Image (cartoon, helix red, strand yellow):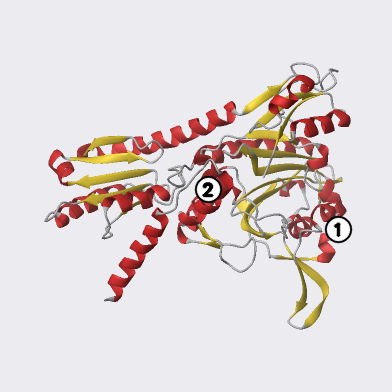
Amino acid sequence: MSRGSHMKNSGADELAKKMKVKLDKDNFPEWYSEIVELSGLVDKRYPIKGMNVWLPYGWELMRNIDEVIRREMRKTSHKEVCFPLLIPQSEFQKEADHIKGFSDEVYWVTHGGSTPLDIPLLLRPTSETAMYPMFSLWVRSHSDLPLKIFQIVNVFRYETKQTRPFIRMREIHFFEAHTCHRDFEEAEKQIQEDLEIMDSVAKELCLPYLKLVRPEWDKFAGAFYSVGIDTLMPSGRTLQIASIHQYKDNFARAYRIMYEDESGEHRYAHQTTYGMSERLIGAVVGMHGDNRGIVLPPAVAPIQVIVVPIPKKGMKEVVEEEALKVKEELAGAGMRVEIDLRDLRPGAKFYDWELKGVPLRLEIGTRDIEEEVVTAVKRNTFEKRKIPIKELLKSVKELLDEVQSELYSAAENFLKEHIFTVRNLKDEAEAYRGIEGVIRVNWCGDMKCAEELEVSLDKSFLGFPPEEKPDGPCAVCGGKAAEVVYLSKSY
């Protein structure tokens, strides 16, 4: 047997193994664990818990998401940097609240070879304590502000809970933006800009979300306040996919980040941060996938269109030649397109590309060639449509836009349908205790009522929607409500 034949058969054998796996999204944890590997995103067999190998398809997906983020950063005048991985313990200790938040999660480097280090180093869990000593050197005058930088790097946290690809990891692919401003008001404008960026990124990923100010006990260590961005998974649990933090001058005081204003006075800068991670992929996989595999939004899919020739006996070259023309025309228009020329049955090819979530499949057979059409199949609905070959570019673009819009609408409807308002805890707790989704309640602000809400509903506080005002009394005590609060079970 030739080497080429062996490789071809190995691919067919691997596909046959995949086709024997029954996916069941109703059992979300098991479905998710299977699908991230079967679809070719990661290999979980690396011998360190919570550190997986990015496979080419998964890494290209992540890179596409990174480029969406970079595009939004460029629009808003952020500049990309890359800081060292290691942070000296002496810098880490300057911010006591930060240590309290991360001290049990860091990885320490204590030796260089066999020589003990004078000052232990740690792998960054996030980069405040790496960046801010440098900010104190960079920021001197009001003319240096605003300072707006970001980086996309790996961070490390010693996660002790059960790890899950993309959702809970020890090595995390991470985006973080850090800014310095003249005062609190300018920093608040940055928070609003970050929220607009989040909206743009979420639209590309077809991920509707909840924007919630975290309660005091759940804000980021060292922050004045934190905004969590949460989406809802099919399991009914929420997943935080981003966070935005207003620091005021808390870190600036610890790291002496000061500037001289126009009158010659020295003032502390006000700071913000904005973070997202590979959890974005976990959310996309969980939200849009089905029992045939993952479903990827066209905006970030590594392959937007897969062309599958379906020849009859004696017509193989003719059909494949026509299919190659279609591929070249789409690629020439800037689309991410591939052609499947493997020696496999069409059904096996369809299964494989459905598993990988390619948004649009174009089938080309002898009848299609005679009719001067291609057969298009949308991955999210499996709707088939004949496209005149003369209208190929226009029609394919329209279909990809349809898929993008339909994915977002379906996810948005799912989120809306799984937010439940509880007016009276005593009367409604039993009905809503085991429900999958998010509970919305009016709350008076008393911690006893907060504890009763969490215990009775078996859910935890997510936070407060800044645009919503109480529309009734506290659901627990009946007193005047101070906040609307959302509760859920979370990953």
Instruction: Find disc 1 in the rendering and name its residue.
Output: 94
Q: Where residue 374 sits: x, y (%)? A: 23, 41
Q: Nearer the viewer, residue 151 or 77?
A: 151
Query: Is residue 453 placed above or below 339 in the rendered structure?
Result: above
At 41% from the left and 54% from the top, the residue drawn is 20
Instruction: Find disc 2 in the rendering and name its residue.
Output: 31
**Crowding at mark 2 (Cα within 10 Å: few <14, some 14-19, many 20+):** some
At 15% from the left and 51% from the top, the residue drawn is 312
At 18% from the left and 52% from the top, the residue drawn is 311
Q: Quadrant of the C terminus?
A: top right
Callout 2 amino acid: Trp
Query: Is residue 411 placed above or below 18 in the rendered structure?
Result: above
Q: Where residue 198 sits: x, y (%)? A: 60, 39
**Crowding at mark 1 (Cα within 10 Å: few <14, some 14-19, many 20+):** some
Q: Nearer the viewer, residue 24 or 389?
A: 24
Task: Name the quadrant containing residue 214.
Answer: top right
Q: Is residue 105 left or right of residue 385?
A: right
At 86% from the left and 50% from the top, the residue drawn is 253
Discs 1/2, front:
2
Question: Residue 161 has which mark?
Answer: none
Q: Earlier in the sequence, mark 1 or mark 2?
A: 2
Specify whether residue 467 is in view: no
Task: Name the quadrant containing residue 315.
Answer: bottom left
Q: Is residue 45 left or right of residue 87?
A: left
Q: Where residue 398 sits: x, y (%)? A: 35, 35
Query: Is residue 489 placed above or below 11 in the rendered structure?
Result: above
Q: Are marks 1 and 2 in contact (CB under 8 Å)?
A: no
Q: Is residue 441 left or right of residue 328?
A: right
Q: Nearer the viewer, residue 290 or 183?
A: 290
Is label 1 in a helix, a strand or a loop?
A: loop
Query: Is residue 28 placed above or below 158 in the rendered structure?
Result: above
